[in-house]
Amino acid sequence: MKRIIRPGLVGIFLFALFLQGAIWGAEPAAHAAPLAQAPRPMPRVIARGTQETSSLRLPLSAAQRAARAPTATINVVYLASGAHNIFGDTCLAWPTAAKTAFSYAASIWAAQIPSSVPITIRACWTGLGSNILGYSSATSFHHDFTGGVAGYWYYSALANALAQTDLNDADWIDWDNDGLDTDADIDIAISNGIAWYYGTDGAVPARQYDLATIALHEIAHGLGFLGWVDYSGGQGSWGFGTGMPGIYDRFVENGAGQKILNSNVFPNPSAALGAQLVSTNLYFNGTNARAANSGNRAKLFAPSTWQAGSSYSHLDETFSNTADALLTFSFGYQEVIHTPGAVTLGILKDLGWTAPTSACYTLNLNASPSAGGKVSASPAPNCEGTKYLPQTNITLTATPNSGYNFYTWSGTVSSRAPTESLTMDANKEITAVFNSSSTQFLFVPMVRR
């Protein structure tokens, strides 16, 4: 029988793994200190309610739902009444409709990320604090495995996808305290004391929160949108005492481009590092995140007062009420976001997820003849720099040049009005047709003989 290592022995086991790494493949000098026990569990990342009504509505269209094709298997284990999650919360019985909304969110992610290894989520329906909608945490973590970048912690969902094997079932550690080595990857708790909307169509009534949106948000954290930093008494640190940062931390820098993992500038731990974590000036700088954000780094939520469970592991509030709002830290009544957003997908790709599926649509605009006038679209592209997120409402305007008149639209839009509206629910090709204002028509009367 395979022996399972209990929590009290995890520190010894991880230290042994470190010695093994020193023999088989030394880690970078910055992480050369012996690894202590990884935190059990990881600090939770919290989604909060604002108790204010939001105007953001981004549900999936019928066409988008039909087009979804799973590229990963996500299994949700709904913990039974009386069970406890890794934080010790006592779970209550899940309402059937709440399960439906949560499973819907899982199905959205299953069509966005590729993995040959099933991802397991343990979901707890429980009482949480005031205005706390839910929280998430990774259940298990790995480092220095085939397919990953050496010297960084990875959450198991991503680690397994990169390694193409279930590392949880090969580490002899009972991460989720269930007596087995077949561990979950993500632990999520959803508050039972919230006025929830359980539907999946985005038609949320007044003064209710959309459960599918919050589940989608929390799953994203478990997939890797979660840093390994802490702040206490003015001191900042990374690694939670292990001497090794998380892969997310590798991409974080301040406004001047200084990496927070640069121990020559920001020793670990130190007040200098702490000042960065509450500087309102932190960014995620990854190639794919920048490409999704019009070439700019993605600003992170780093308020001047540290907010445990919110700071650092969310996008900045400048993304609120935009198509990339899913990974901001707070949500309003009736706020509906059923797409991850281009910036979040870019960040996940930088972390190592291989080519998350883009949810963007292309709008190609033409003028005929090209000298006849111009075509403009408002708002500007909001996905991957040049594309649009699904359900974005677009206003098209055809402006003729001197000597020309607008005649008609052709393509996806068919109208004689120079200003027209459309919704991005597919790739679209549209042409504004102009004719010369000097065109003369000669009418010759017919004469009967």
Image (cartoon, rainbow, N blue to C red):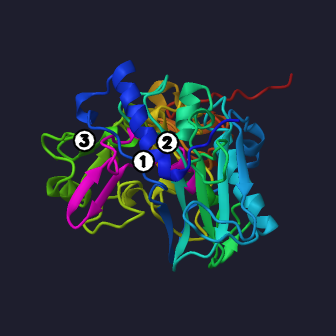
Label 3: which secondary element? loop
Amino acid bearing label 2: Phe
Crowd around label 1: few <14 · some 14–19 · many ≥20 (10 Å): many
Q: Mark 2 points at which residue?
A: 141
Image coordinates for residue 40, horizontal then vertical, percent: 48, 54
Who's the residue at 62% across and 29% down the image?
441
In the image, 27 versus 404, the foreground residue is: 27
Image coordinates for residue 406, horizontal then vertical, percent: 54, 39
The quarter of the rendered structure image containing the C terminus is top right
Crowd around label 3: few <14 · some 14–19 · many ≥20 (10 Å): many
Residue 394 in sight from this viewpoint: no
Q: What stretch is highlighted in magenta?
A: 218-247
Amino acid bearing label 1: Ala
Q: Mark 1 points at which residue?
A: 38
Amino acid bearing label 3: Leu
Alpha-carbon span between mark 2 and mark 3: 19 Å
Say if 153 sits above or below 6 in the image: above
In the image, 331 versus 273, the foreground residue is: 273
The quarter of the rendered structure image containing the N terminus is top right
State yes or no: discs 1 and 2 in contact (Cβ < 8 Å).
yes
Who's the residue at 63% across and 27% down the image?
442
Q: Earlier in the sequence, mark 2 or mark 3?
A: 2
Image coordinates for residue 8, horizontal then vertical, percent: 49, 52
Q: Mark 3 points at which residue?
A: 261
